[in-house]
Image (cartoon, rainbow, N blue to C red):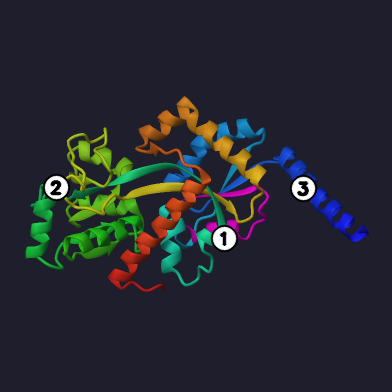
Amino acid sequence: MQFGRFIAAAAASLVLAASAFAQAYPQRPVIVVVPFVPGGSSDTTMRTLSARMGESLGQSVVLDNKPGANGTLGAGLVVRAQPDGYTLLIGSVGTYAISPQLLKSVTWDARKDLDMLAMPVRTPNVVVVAPSFPANTIAELVEYMKKHPGQVSFASAGTGSTDHLSALLLWQKTGTQGVHVPYKGGGAAITDVMGNHSNVLITNLGVLTPHIKAGKLKALAVTSAKRVPELPDVPTLTELGLKGLEIYSWQGVAAPKGLPPAVRTRIVASLNDAMKDPQARKSLEDAGFEMVSMTPAQAATELNAEINRWKTVIETAGIKAE
């Protein structure tokens, strides 16, 4: 009987301790690891949201840039951190769903080792071609590739990037084959396509829109579910009859696995507050992002779907982890 009372008392103490911790959280600044250099999409997204998050939490939200290994270096630091709400991660679809499948050095799985909190923003890709390239539509591009197999070059920000995987998926869905030309970053890829040194590029709406409007690139299609206001005359791949090619580059916020539920609720509420801020919304939308409202459960479901999708693309292409 006394032992039973002891167990009950111990359990009650743990519940009270957890509750007290949650109520006191946060007592110091919250660190958000950005696994890329400053200025990229992950960095821009969190810098835009962090001030309002900090106001909501009553503590500063501080960014810590830890670039390396296609975003997996910084992500790994968060995986190994304490699940106390003081270390968070913001990363791209590549960080969570693609790079871990291509690097043997990555031993963690985002589904098992991280608690997804939100996917606050996303942006579709645009299929663009060099100014002098003969195709002006997706149909013409596919026809040209079938007549010239293995001769059309697709630039990307690097092997394993969403640009690269998007090109692979397009080839697989259309029964074509191009030549992948990886660059050291998206800027170099865009420059070479504009200069007619590479033929095709599939990358984020936000970075391509100014060049498209300036006539330096030809936009053939967007990978969103519906047309985007930035390029209202550019059709979607879906409306052109190409199914399974809705592609978004999204940003996800996560914490080490095992985050206390009450702490998770506080963090998610602060993210939601930040996303409702008119100035933050305008800033992100002007950068080409679409604001997305997802619960942690919905974000986890989306992550699982994305991992499975890109796994199929990688396996079909015969790419092995290195």
Which mark, by number, is residue 84? Answer: none
- What element does badge 2 sit on? loop
| Residue, far right | 2
- Left-right relation of 197 to 19: left
Which one is closest to the eye, mark 2 or mark 1? Answer: 1
Amino acid type shown at disc 2: Pro
Magenta range is: 71-91
Residue 292 appears anywhere in the view: yes
Residue 74 within the magenta-colored segment of the rendering: yes
Vertical relation: 56 (above or below) 191: above
Vertical relation: 152 (above or below) 90: below
Whether residues under marks 2 and 1 lie with C-beta atoms below 8 angstroms apart, the answer is no
- Left-right relation of 237 to 281: left
Which mark, by number, is residue 15? Answer: 3
Amino acid type shown at disc 1: Asp
- What element does badge 1 sit on? helix
Residue 81 spot, x, y in % from top left: 64, 57
The residue indicated by pointer 1 is 113
Vertical relation: 120 (above or below) 149: above
Which one is closest to the eye, mark 3 or mark 1? Answer: 3
Q: Nearer the viewer, residue 39 or 86?
A: 86
Q: Answer few, some or many: residues within 10 Å of disc 1's Cα (few below 14, many 20 plus, some between 14 and 19).
A: some
Tell how many labels: 3
The residue indicated by pointer 2 is 131
Q: Nearer the viewer, residue 135 or 309?
A: 309
